[in-house]
């Protein structure tokens, strides 16, 4: 994927419109100051010429207006840059806030998980984070800088033409190669930023790995610090090599143009000095010529730099626009073009019909024609070895992905015809790979249902057996469950895996009456006593509810209404616990294997 997939004019219009929306009055202020500071050097040069000519003529009566004008221009030139710096910084802050809001609104609007798992999308998102906030601001700032340079350059060229038309033409023509060099370097710089984005993400990953606590135990135990540091430095060296390559080309191009400009300035200086010595030019002519040549060259160089910077910013802004324009990763399939429907209560049940799924066209099939029924108000337990596809089926039920073949029906309606957000509001879930947020204990539970008050949060913690754990913390439910962001007023704590499991379980139980309750390894990380307690709570909680229970521990699923065995992406067998044990198939094998682990040594 490359930046600037849309036309440059469209991208420019979007960047300017966004900048105007974020801080229009700061844009106006910068435009006024740009005009003032753009003409100030030209007027200063002219008034300086008039003062010098007046002094050389030994006159003094007309000096006062010129001196007053020079003082006023000095005030503008002195204070203007500081005010522009303040206005520019505040403008960029406002643009950055708006752009970041829009960027993550777009990311959050992606209904599934596929885009977030694409390396190319992650690279583009990384570039959009970097370039998006600065892009619109840089476009406007560079455009204003270009306008300022045009004003300054035009004024000095007119001034210079009044003294020497030939030198004026020569100075203007000499800027054309400089423009070409800067535009080429701007494109190369944008391309380097694009091509090194992946390496920068990996360098950041290794740096975070070395500094964050989640991997610290293994890194210390296995002595991996130098290994990951080496990987980090290797990625950084590769990125730096690309940047250095462009920097060398930039030095060569700009250095050559600087030598050409110096040669023109030196030749012009020799000529005007000779003219002044011969009496064909005044001291004022000499001073205005020197100022005009230097000002014209400086204005042209600034204009070219700003034009190249705006060009580069537009190229990078394309990454931001591409993220906002990313197509949804779940394709709606609604009858007769109607909008997505909201699911109703489950009165009949959930049906999985001949579902095939894989995580990419070049990846192996994870599910191969799965057929399942979860009747309303009943419980289905899904068991199988690691990699059998159990968690993948959970993701399809939550509509994080869509089946490649087949369908999942909610009371006879294909999930692809339902609004994903409305569907998920009717689900309750405890995931095996639950998130541990760097938030307070209460907030870690409350994210399961943001409409819940403290009373419901604490009630869910009681049901999950987490209440006693939380109340023993330094600040109870207000204790921060991390040490990364704690301070003197709120000391953070870290929880054990089993304690976090209780918090995650309370989060899943916060939705009081979900239409479908999904329990994916809810007892993982718990000791036998805690496992029994949680199993009892969940058995009571799921009574009369439509429930999918996934567990490796068959003792926790034996009381489910139906047990299905998933093997090699297919349903190998299904039935009740006693029925499957008598059948002597895969379930019986798994159950016997686990039972032997609890038998006395002599009995095995």
Image: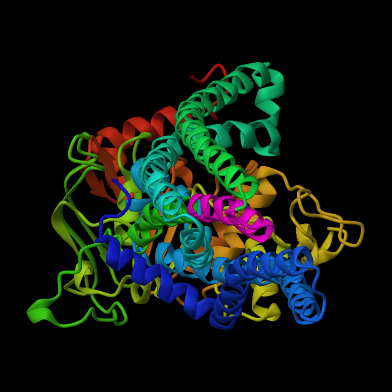
Residue drawn at x 63%, y 68% is 46
| Chosen colour scheme | rainbow
Of the pair 255 and 462, the residue shown nearer to us? 255
**Residue 297 vs residue 218: left or right?**
left
Q: Position of residue 595 (x, y in %)?
A: 47, 32
The magenta region covers 280-302
The residue most toward the left is 336
Q: Position of residue 545 (x, y in %)?
A: 40, 71
Q: Position of residue 416 (x, y in %)?
A: 21, 67
In the image, residue 233 sits, relative to residue 208, either above or below, namely: above
Magenta stretch: dominant secondary structure: helix
Number of disc labels: 0
Foreground of the two, 325 or 493: 325
Most distant residue in the right direction: 488
Q: Is residue 273 left or right of residue 171?
A: right
Residue at image location 32% in from the left, 47% down from the top: 392
Res. 540 visible in picture? no
Q: Quadrant of residue 220?
A: top right
Q: Front-most of 353 and 270?
A: 270
Query: Residue 129 lies in magenta, yes or no?
Result: no
Q: Quadrant of residue 447?
A: bottom right
> 434 above or below 177?
below
How far from the left and from the top, in percent, is residue 532?
Answer: 60, 50
Pick the quarter of the image with the N terminus. Answer: top left
Q: Is residue 146 left or right of residue 218?
A: left
Is residue 159 something one can see in this rendering? Answer: yes
**Can residue 296 be found in the magenta stretch?**
yes
């Amino acid at each position: 994927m490359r930046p600037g997939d849309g036309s440059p004019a469209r991208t420019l219009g979007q960047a300017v419109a966004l900048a105007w929306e974020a801080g229009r009055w700061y844009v106006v202020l910068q435009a006024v100051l740009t005009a003032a500071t753009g003409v100030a050097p030209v007027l200063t040069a002219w008034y300086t010429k008039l003062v010098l000519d007046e002094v050389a003529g030994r006159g003094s009566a007309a000096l006062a207006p010129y001196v007053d004008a020079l003082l006023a221009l000095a005030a503008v030139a002195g204070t203007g840059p500081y005010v522009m710096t303040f206005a520019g910084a505040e403008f960029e802050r406002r643009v950055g806030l708006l752009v970041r809001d829009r960027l993550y609104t777009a990311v959050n609007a992606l209904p599934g998980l596929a885009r977030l798992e694409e390396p190319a999308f992650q690279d583009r998102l990384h570039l959009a984070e970097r370039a998006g906030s600065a892009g619109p601001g840089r476009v406007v700032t560079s455009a204003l800088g270009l306008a300022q340079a045009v004003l300054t350059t035009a004024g000095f060229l007119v001034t210079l033409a009044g003294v020497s038309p030939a030198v004026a033409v020569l100075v203007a023509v000499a800027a054309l190669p400089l423009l070409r060099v800067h535009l080429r370097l701007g494109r190369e710089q944008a391309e380097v930023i694009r091509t090194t984005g992946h390496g920068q993400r990996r360098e950041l990953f290794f740096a975070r790995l070395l500094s964050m606590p989640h991997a610290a135990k293994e890194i210390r135990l296995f002595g991996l610090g130098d290994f990951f540091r080496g990987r980090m430095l290797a990625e950084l060296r590769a990125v730096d090599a690309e940047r250095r390559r462009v920097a060398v080309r930039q030095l060569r191009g700009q250095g050559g143009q600087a030598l050409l400009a110096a040669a023109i300035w030196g030749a012009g200086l020799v000529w005007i000095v000779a003219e002044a010595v011969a009496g064909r030019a005044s001291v004022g002519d000499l001073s205005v010529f020197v100022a005009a040549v230097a000002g014209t060259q400086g204005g042209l160089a600034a204009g070219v730099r700003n034009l190249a910077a705006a060009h580069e910013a537009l190229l990078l802004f394309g990454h931001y626009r591409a993220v906002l324009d990313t197509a949804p990763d779940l394709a709606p399939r609604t009858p007769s073009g109607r909008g997505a429907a909201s699911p109703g209560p489950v009165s009949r049940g959930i049906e999985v019909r001949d579902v095939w799924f894989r995580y990419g066209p070049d990846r192996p099939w994870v599910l191969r024609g799965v057929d399942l029924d979860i009747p309303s108000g009943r419980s289905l337990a899904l068991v199988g070895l690691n990699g059998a596809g159990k968690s993948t089926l959970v993701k399809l039920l939550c509509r994080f992905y869509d089946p490649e073949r087949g369908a999942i029906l909610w009371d006879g309606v294909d999930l692809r015809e339902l609004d994903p957000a409305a569907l998920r509001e009717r689900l309750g879930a405890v995931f095996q790979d639950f998130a541990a947020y760097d938030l307070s204990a209460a907030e870690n539970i409350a994210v399961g249902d943001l409409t819940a008050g403290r009373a419901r949060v604490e009630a869910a913690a009681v049901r999950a057996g987490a209440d006693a754990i939380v109340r023993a913390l330094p600040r109870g439910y207000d204790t921060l469950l991390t040490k990364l962001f704690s301070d003197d007023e709120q000391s953070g704590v870290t929880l054990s895996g089993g304690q976090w499991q209780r918090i995650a379980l309370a989060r899943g139980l916060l939705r009081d009456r979900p239409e479908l309750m999904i329990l994916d390894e809810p007892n993982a990380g718990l000791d036998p006593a805690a496992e029994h307690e949680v199993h009892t709570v969940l058995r009571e909680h799921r009574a009369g509810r439509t429930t999918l229970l996934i567990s490796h521990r068959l003792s926790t699923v034996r009381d489910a209404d139906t047990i299905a065995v998933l093997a090699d992406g297919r349903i190998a067998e299904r039935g009740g616990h006693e029925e499957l044990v008598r059948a002597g198939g895969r379930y019986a094998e798994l159950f016997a294997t686990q039972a032997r682990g609890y038998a006395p040594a002599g009995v095995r």
